[in-house]
Structure formats: C-alpha cells, structure tokens
Image (cartoon, helix red, strand yellow):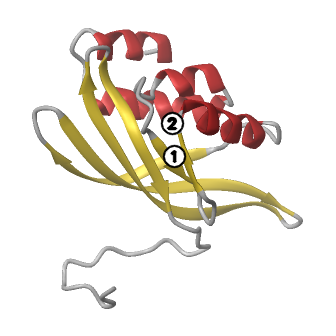
Amino acid sequence: MSTKTKLRAATVGGTADDIEAAFYEALQRGDVDSLMDCWADEEEIFCVHPGGPRLVGADAIRAAFEHMFSNGAIHATPARVRKVESLASAVHNVLERIEVLTAEGPRHAFVLATNVYHKTPQGWRMVAHHASPGSAQEPGDTGDAPQTIH
C-alpha cells in the first residue's frame, strides 16, 4: 500500500498505525511532503530529535527534516511497538533501528522514540515525535520498576 493510499485510508477511518507506517515509509524515501502529511494541522505539534531542541510547529519540523534529508533518506525501521490507545489518541513507543554509514561500512544504531497521535477532522495524525539519543546496542525491555527515578 502506498503512502498516499495509507493517508487516504487514515482520512476516512484508518488508524494511528496507518499514519505511523506512512511516517516511517516517508523517512525511508526522504519524502518531506509525505512525512508532513502525517502531522496534524495544529500549531502546537512538536518534535524532538536525538540530542536536539524541541521543535514546535509545522514550519520548524519541516525545516529540520529537510535538513536531515539533504544528507539522504533516513533508513529507520520501527520495531517492538508498545501502544496505549483510546478513542481519540494513541501513544506508541517504538524501537527505531537506524542504518548508518560509517568508515567501516553500514552499521545499525537504535533509538527509542515515542509517537503521539490524535484523531483529528482529517483522520489520525501525529502530534508529537520524541526520540532519545541513539545506542549501538539494542536496548532491552524491562517490566520491573524503573532503575532511575527522576
């Protein structure tokens, strides 16, 4: 299913999962227009890239992704999705497996990201994307109490 088909499905009653799939497909293609179609048309949408500042609003988010795509597409694949969903909102925590090119050749890095979706008049749309700094090791899941309290 193409990204445009997924966005059309989301508009007429699709799911937050449809928008998430379209978002990661747009990242992998370096397609800023399709990526921005995944975001809600709201002033307070925000995005935090690993180690970066909070970007608020569509213009700031678009500019950041355009800058990132100037170096090529982002080969990020979501895995191990954890979801909290309700009738009008969904929160997905995903492990992003990102392929990076190094002097030694392609390697993988792992980033934990939280994607928040709201059901809007246009269908499900992303309202927040927050990604942690990356790691060369795939992080494990813990079901126990947090090790660090902050």
The residue sitting at 44% across, 74% down in the picture is 139
Residue under pointer 1: 77
SS label for mark 1: strand
At x 57% / y 29%, what residue is drawn?
26
Q: Which circle, 1 or 2, is nearer the viewer?
A: 2
Name the spot of residue 98 as percent of width and height, x first: 61, 54
Q: Position of residue 58 (x, y in %)?
A: 55, 31
Residue 39 in which image quadrant: top left
Of the pair 130 and 23, the residue shown nearer to us: 130
Q: Are marks 1 and 2 in contact (CB under 8 Å)?
A: yes
Q: Quadrant of the C terminus?
A: bottom left
> Quick one: which residue is furthest to the front in this view?
43
Q: Which residue is mark 2?
A: 24
What amino acid does circle 2 point to? Tyr
- From what the image shows, is residue 93 above or below residue 135? above
Residue 16 percent location from the top left of the image:
28, 32
In which image quadrant can residue 54 be found?
A: bottom right
Q: Residue at x 54, y 56 (%)?
A: 97
